[in-house]
Image (cartoon, coloured by chain):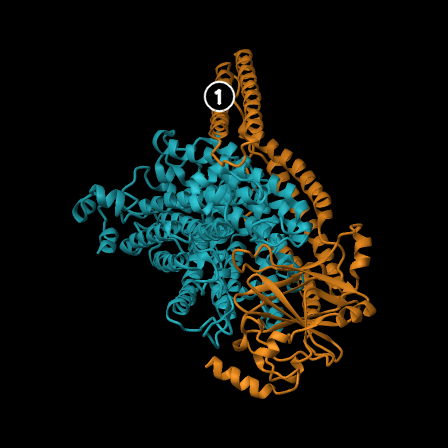
């Protein structure tokens, strides 16, 4: 009986192999033939049919296997032996899953975990990374222990007619223990996390912070640097138009020397304060290398303060990637092109920064000046703005 | 009317015939019988789950092969996949509708709707729900909501596409993206009906549990499933109305020119006339529902798993009281943690700190539950039914996904992990996979109660292992994408040099997802086949203690012929020493089990305790005589 089933399954296997081979041959032939005529998109029904057939074959395989198992089971029972003991089979499967799964998790953590972000390139980022490490170690310990217990118990206490379960409805001591221990561990994490959070989100304004405005709109970021005065001009969204996208308020004299930039260039080891605006929908300013993220919310300007500590050049050496760039990208769904809303961020030395800054163009372009009827930067701004107001009404 | 009819039947046959004549329409369509409504919820839920799963496979294909054209997709989807490639807008729609359907239509209505309807009356010993009519309405509102939600695939610009959280202004400005037009209108309409359905169901569940328990069934004798469904319903009743408020204000903003959520907006270079609103307000309203919602999703799964694990480990659930108190703790805490979804929205950082504390506190009851499940398995006599395997899978996912919650609940760590694939991995494990596994465990376990036949075990095993392994293969690698700062809801990673190296992982995940998706065929075949041709069940196929297994196999409106059984004991007397069988159903009085009674059984029953002491004394007195 068992012999016959073996032949049976072998036949099916070889049939399957033949089918697979011929199928892939067919597909390759198709691909080769299809390559020159790639312009005409047509459904490749052969391959659709092939995959459907493959699926049905898999189903058939399952059915055949099921039947074979049933027949085998019945024949065992007819011979007076016990049939399949599914408790043993499933218990063993649990054990195998535990071993293979643990290895898989280990592999994934080492292989794919090593693809995660390089070391934090900002001062607060180091604290965040330390906390991440502590949390990872703690949770990994719990993960390994609990999964081993779970699947270990399943194997070890797999059912049998000879035993009975152990009647244990409760045990107050042990319950108290495993309420208090997680509570203590979590308290430590909370306290640690709370202070780090407070520190990162420190809102006190220090003199000498470099203020930079970053504004998100569908689907780009606008960057504005303060000029020599170090102060950014006010923004009035109502004044936004084609030339003055951000709606910079030119009644504010601080705005006259503001600079427009294409790249977010930051001096290393200086405190940077990024003022985050959004014009249309919510965006999120995300700079993962610096462990910086804050949403850009229309009508609610926010800011994030941080100190970059590693220049782009240094990071290129560290990551052994000559093309490495820090990036700023959108991390809150904002529309169809959400997936491509990025800016390059470059961290440079103080000298390089000053040099770069001096080459940037003012936000107040000639076109804008004309529109605002500003006579070569002379402060006739008040008059112009009253005109604009009239226009807006 | 119906309530009375159902209540008053002392003599069942007579009452049944008298009150409503069974026609095809009121038996199989507009049924008011909780068991049939449960089946309606289940079948609708399964269909919605398959639809949502198909959507996910579509967008997984896009992520794995961003540069490749599949002409078949154009044939199937038409303008949504021009040239055989999904359009970015439709990709967003797929993500949005996948999330919406899975969270609300499958794991809220499909899970709670099915098992609350089926189990509450049967397990507390009632003939039907408090209001069978409202219960029926609850299903029909749910079906209507489902149809409206799916119909959005047929409007010109496609379904809602702002993510399942539909944050304004994206969702409030029809011009901001294609899906924010008619698709969003349909989404909002659908949700209003859905919430109405959910409230009608929830109020029914709570009132049934509070008022219609059979004699002897005090709250501390209820099975954990009923406790979980009870607290879930309370959560839903308190949280869902807030979402209605949020949704109605959004409708005003969209169609009546109000500015509840909008302020200072320039769209496509046009200054918009909105002023004074706050997008953050919507997020507060949404997550005030949204966070309890994830517990609405997971608590029934926890209850179902607790029950199934106890039945199949042939052991009492460890720490029954702790299990109930932790559920209560989760329910209460779930209302004060919503801010952890908003750490980086620009909400006041001090608030972020507060929400971080409450969030990490909620991990304590969750940990207690996990340890209690493990303790229940310890020294059990574990019977591997498919239901048991799925319940175990639920525990495994809950551990794996729950632990990453400790990262995300920490505001400082959330800065870099927020909205990345780490979050996707986290919630798909802890609430997605875990809750689905809870639901499947319930289906396998109570299938005999619903359809009077058994499901095939071996197909169940195949289904379990393929799905279980598939889910881990899909979601485990995503953690590391998140750690590399790969954002979720990206149509393609081709625009970023640094993300291209994740393409191979994406291909792997997609194929794992396809495998897990195909594995569901094993379930659906088993399900449909067993309904019609499965092996006939016996009355109590799992040797379980709860009341539903004392009801006859045949279904009729009213559940029990004659009197409803009285309850004498808690539902977890499995493998009690001194008893010849390894289970003692709840309706067996202590007087019939003198040899296995423990003093602990008579805590609030002095008369019983006296009886018990007397009995043990005589036993002791008799011994030396022998």
User: Which residue lies under the disc numbered 1?
Assistant: A64
Left or right of A43 on screen, residue B139: left
Image location of residue B449, percent across then percent down: 37, 39
Is B374 in front, or is A114?
A114
Q: In which quarter of the view is residue B526 placed?
A: top left
What percent of the width, then of the height, locates residue B331? 49, 61
- Residue A36 horizontal/vertical position (percent): 57, 31
Mark 1 packing: few (<14 Cα in 10 Å), some, or many (20+)? some
User: In the rendered image of this protein, does residue B425 appear above or below residue A81?
Assistant: below
Task: Give the color of chain B as drawn.
Answer: cyan
Please tell me which residue is depicted at 35% across the width and 35% down the height of the picture.
B452
The structure residue drawn at horizontal position 73% and vertical position 44%, both measured from the top left corner, is A110
Q: Viewer-proximal residue, A224 or A143?
A: A224
Name the spot of residue A92 as percent of width and height, x first: 61, 31
User: In the rendered structure, the residue with mark 1 lies on which chain?
Assistant: A
Q: Residue at x 61, y 39 (%)?
A: B508
The image quarter in which residue A333 lies = bottom right
Q: Is residue B56 above or below residue B335?
A: above
Viewer-nearest residue: B598 or A181: A181
Q: Quadrant of the N terminus of chain B?
A: bottom left
Q: How many marks?
A: 1
Inspect this view and state whether residue A159 appears.
yes
The answer to whether any part of residue B593 appears in the image is no
Q: Residue at x 57, y 48 (%)?
A: B429
- Element type where label 1 sits in the image: helix
Residue pushed farthest left? B18
Chain drawn orange in the picture: A
């Amino acid at each position: 009986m068992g012999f016959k089933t073996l032949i049976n399954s072998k036949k099916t296997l070889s049939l399957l192999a033949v089918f697979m081979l011929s199928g892939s041959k067919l597909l390759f032939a198709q691909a080769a033939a299809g390559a020159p005529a790639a312009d005409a998109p047509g459904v490749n029904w052969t391959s659709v049919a092939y995959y459907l057939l493959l699926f049905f074959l898999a189903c058939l395989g399952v059915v055949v296997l099921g039947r074979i198992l049933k027949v085998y089971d019945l024949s065992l029972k007819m011979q007076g032996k016990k049939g399949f003991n599914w408790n043993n089979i499933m218990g063993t499967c649990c054990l195998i899953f535990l071993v293979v799964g643990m290895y898989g998790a280990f592999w994934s953590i080492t292989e794919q975990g090593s693809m995660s972000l390089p070391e934090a390139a900002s001062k607060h980022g180091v604290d965040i990374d330390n906390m991440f490490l502590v949390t990872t170690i703690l949770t990994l310990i719990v993960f390994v222990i609990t999964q081993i217990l779970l699947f270990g118990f399943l194997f070890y206490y797999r059912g049998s007619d000879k035993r009975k379960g152990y009647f244990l409805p409760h045990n107050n001591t042990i319950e108290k223990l495993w309420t208090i221990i997680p509570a203590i561990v979590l308290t430590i994490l909370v306290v640690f996390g709370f202070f780090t959070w407070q520190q990162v989100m420190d809102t006190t304004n220090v003199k000498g912070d470099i203020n930079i405005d970053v504004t998100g709109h569908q689907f780009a970021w606008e960057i504005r640097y303060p000029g020599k005065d170090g102060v950014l001009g006010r923004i009035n969204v109502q004044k936004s138009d084609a030339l003055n996208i951000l709606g910079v308020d030119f009644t504010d004299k601080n705005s006259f020397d503001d600079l427009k930039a294409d790249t977010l260039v930051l001096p290393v080891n200086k405190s940077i304060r990024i003022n985050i605006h959004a014009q249309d929908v919510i965006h999120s300013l995300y700079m993962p290398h610096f462990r910086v993220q804050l949403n850009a919310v229309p009508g609610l300007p926010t800011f994030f303060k941080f100190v970059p500590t590693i220049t782009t050049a240094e990071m290129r050496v560290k990551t052994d990637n000559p093309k490495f760039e820090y990036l700023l990208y959108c991390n809150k769904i904002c529309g169809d092109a959400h997936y491509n809303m990025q800016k390059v961020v470059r961290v440079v030395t103080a000298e390089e920064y000053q040099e770069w800054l001096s080459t940037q163009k003012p936000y107040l372009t000639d076109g804008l000046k004309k529109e605002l009827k500003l006579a070569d930067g002379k402060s006739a701004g008040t008059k112009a703005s009253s005109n604009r107001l009239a226009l807006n009404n | 009317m119906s309530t009375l009819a159902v209540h008053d039947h002392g003599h069942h046959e007579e009452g049944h015939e008298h009150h409503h004549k069974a026609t095809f329409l009121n038996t199989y369509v507009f049924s008011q019988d909780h068991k049939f409504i449960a089946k309606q919820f289940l079948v609708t839920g399964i269909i919605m789950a398959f639809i949502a799963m198909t959507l996910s496979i579509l967008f997984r294909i896009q992520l794995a092969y961003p540069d490749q054209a599949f002409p078949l997709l154009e044939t199937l989807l038409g303008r949504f996949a021009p040239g055989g490639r999904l359009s970015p807008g439709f990709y967003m729609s797929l993500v949005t509708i996948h999330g919406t359907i899975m969270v609300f239509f499958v794991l809220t209505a499909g899970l709670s709707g099915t098992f609350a309807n089926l189990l509450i009356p049967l397990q507390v010993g009632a003939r039907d729900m408090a209001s069978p009519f409202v219960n029926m309405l609850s299903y029909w509102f749910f079906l209507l909501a489902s149809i409206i939600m799916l119909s959005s695939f047929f409007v010109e610009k496609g379904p809602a596409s702002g993510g399942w959280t539909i944050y304004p202004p994206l969702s409030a400005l029809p011009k901001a993206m294609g899906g924010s037009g008619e698709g969003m209108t349909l989404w909002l309409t659908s949700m209003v009906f859905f919430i109405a359905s959910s409230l009608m169901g929830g109020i029914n569940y709570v009132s049934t549990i509070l008022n219609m328990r059979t004699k002897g069934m005090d709250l501390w004798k209820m099975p954990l499933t009923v406790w979980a469904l009870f607290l879930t319903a309370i959560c839903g009743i308190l949280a869902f109305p807030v979402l209605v408020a949020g949704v109605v204000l959004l409708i005003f903003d969209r169609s009546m020119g109000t500015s509840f959520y909008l302020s200072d907006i320039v769209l496509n270079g046009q200054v918009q006339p909105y002023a004074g609103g706050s997008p953050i307000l919507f997020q507060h309203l949404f997550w005030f529902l949204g966070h309890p919602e994830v517990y609405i999703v997971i608590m029934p799964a926890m209850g179902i798993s607790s029950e199934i694990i106890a039945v199949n480990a042939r052991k009492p659930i460890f720490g029954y009281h702790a299990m109930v108190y932790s559920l209560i703790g989760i329910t209460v805490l779930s209302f004060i943690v919503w801010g952890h979804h908003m750490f980086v929205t620009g909400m006041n950082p001090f608030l972020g700190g507060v929400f971080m504390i409450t969030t990490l506190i909620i991990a304590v009851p969750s940990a207690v539950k996990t340890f209690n499940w493990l303790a229940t398995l310890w020294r059990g006599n574990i019977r591997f039914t498919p239901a048991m395997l799925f319940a175990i899978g639920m525990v495994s996912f809950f551990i794996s996904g729950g632990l990453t919650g400790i990262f995300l609940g920490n505001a400082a760590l959330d800065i870099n992990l927020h909205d990345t694939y780490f979050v996707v991995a986290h919630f798909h494990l802890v609430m997605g996979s875990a809750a689905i596994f809870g639901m499947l465990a319930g289906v396998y376990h109570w299938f005999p109660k619903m359809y009077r036949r058994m499901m095939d075990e071996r197909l169940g095993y195949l289904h379990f292992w393929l799905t279980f392994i598939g889910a881990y293969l899909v979601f485990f690698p995503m953690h590391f994408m998140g750690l590399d700062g790969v954002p979720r809801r990206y149509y393609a990673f081709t625009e970023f040099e640094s993300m291209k190296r994740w393409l191979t992982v994406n291909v792997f995940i997609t194929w794992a997802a396809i495998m897990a998706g195909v594995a569901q065929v094993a379930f659906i075949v088993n399900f449909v086949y067993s309904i019609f041709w499965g092996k006939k069940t016996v009355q109590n196929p799992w040797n379980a203690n709860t009341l539903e297994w004392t009801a006859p196999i045949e279904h009729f409106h009213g559940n029990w012929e004659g009197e409803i059984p009285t309850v004498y004991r808690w539902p977890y007397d499995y493998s009690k020493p001194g008893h010849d069988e390894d289970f003692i159903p709840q309706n067996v009085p202590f007087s019939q089990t003198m040899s296995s009674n423990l003093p602990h059984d008579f805590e609030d029953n002095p008369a019983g305790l006296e009886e018990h002491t007397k009995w043990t004394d005589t036993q002791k007195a008799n011994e030396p005589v022998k």
